[in-house]
Image: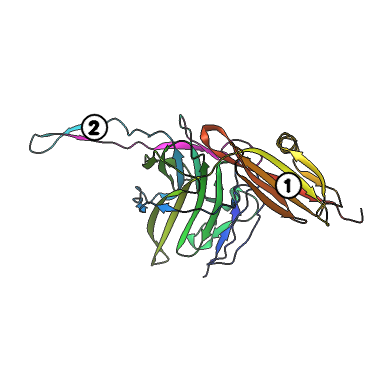
Amino acid sequence: MNNKETVKAAFSAPKSRHTPGKNISCKKISAALFCLTAALLLSSCSLALDEAPARPGQDRLAGIFVTSEYIRQGTPEIKMNSRGEITIEETTEKIYGTLNKDAGSTQPPITFPGLEGYGLYRLEFPEMDFTGTGVTDYSSGNDIVGYYTCDDFFTDLYFFSTDEEEGAEGSIYISPDVGFVYYFNPVYQQADGQIYLLPGTGLSTTSFTDGQKQSHDTSQSITRNRAGKEETKSYRFKVSIVAADPPAETELFFMSEDHQLLQSLTEAQLDALGERESPGLELPADVSYLILRQKTKNGAESTHRLFDRGEETLTYMMPAENHMLREIQLPLFWQDAGQ
C-alpha cells in the first residue's frame, strides 16, 4: 500500500494506530462519542446486505442513522408521460445534518433536524480542519483525514480500514421484554463535507429473547479515476440490535490478595462516582481485584465479572430510556502497594 494511514477515533487525541491493511478496534473514550465491546455470548441473525446506490456526484456512504420512526419521503410528483398517462413518482429529499466538532461536548456527533436516533459514522475532512492524526489519503491530491465516531448507545464498536474497504460495525442493546421497530437510514457525505441522510429500510420483531441478535448491513462501492487509473473502494456499515436482560441490582466488591472482602460499593455509589467532574474510582493498595455482581429484575439470576489489578476501566451495562441499555465506563486508578 502506497498511502500512509493511521486511525483516529472521533474528534480527540488518537487512542490506537494500525498498520495499513489491518482491521482495528477502538474503545469508547467519552460518553457521547465512543463505544466499548460488551462481554455477552450471543446467537445471531443477519439480514441481507443492502447495496446503497452511489449518490449524484458520487457522494460517499458515510454511516447509518438508526431511528424508531420511519422517515417519510418528499412530496410525490404527479407527471404526464408521452402517452398522456398520469404517473406519480416518489421524491427523496436529502435531510442535512449539523456536525458537532467539540470533543468535550455531550451532544451527538451529528444532529438531523426533527429526527431522533443514533448514528455510526466514518467522516472525511481536510487534514487542516483538525489536530492530531487520522486515516490520511495522500493519493487524492489533497490530504483527507478519516474520522470515526458514533452516538452514545453503540457498543461492540469495530472500525476497519484497508485499501479496498472502509467502515464500521456496532451494536445497540435493548431489553427483550418488548418488540422493536428500527429503521436504518444511510448517511452520505458530499465532496464539500456536508452530511445528509436518506430514508432507509427497517426491521421489526414482536418476540425478542435474551441473547438474540438481528443485524443490518449497508454498503456502497465507488470507482474513481486517480492519476489515470481506476480504483474501486467499498464503504460498509453494520448495526446489530441485541437483546439483553437489564440488571435490577449492581454491586462492586473490593477483594484482597487472599480473596477476602475489603469493602463494597452500591449502584448509587457507583453512579455518584461516574457523575463527578473527573469521574473515576481510586483503589487502595491492598485491593487485588474487583468483582462486579449484577442481578436481574426478578433476582433469579446474577452475573459476576472479574477485574484484575491494572485494568484501566470498569465497564457494565445499565437500563436506559426507550427500553435500551447503556454501557457505563468508570476509569480505575490503582494505588501502588508502596504508597
308 relative position to 137: left or right: right
Q: Residue 232's x, y, as percent?
A: 39, 63
User: Residue under circle 1?
Assistant: 331
Look at label 1 and name its amino acid.
Answer: Pro
Magenta stretch, main secondary structure class: loop
The answer to whether the residue labelled 2 contacts the one labelled 1, judged by CB atoms less than 8 Å apart, is no
Q: Is residue 205 magenta?
A: no
CA neighbours of label 1 inside 10 A, class few (<14), some (14 to 19), many (20+): some
311 relative position to 106: left or right: right
The magenta segment is 87-113
User: Residue under circle 2?
Assistant: 77
Query: In front of the other: label 2 or label 1?
Result: 1
Residue 212 seen: yes
Q: Is residue 188 above or below residue 88?
A: below
Residue shown at 65%/50% (left/top)? 131
Q: Residue 267's x, y, as percent?
A: 70, 37
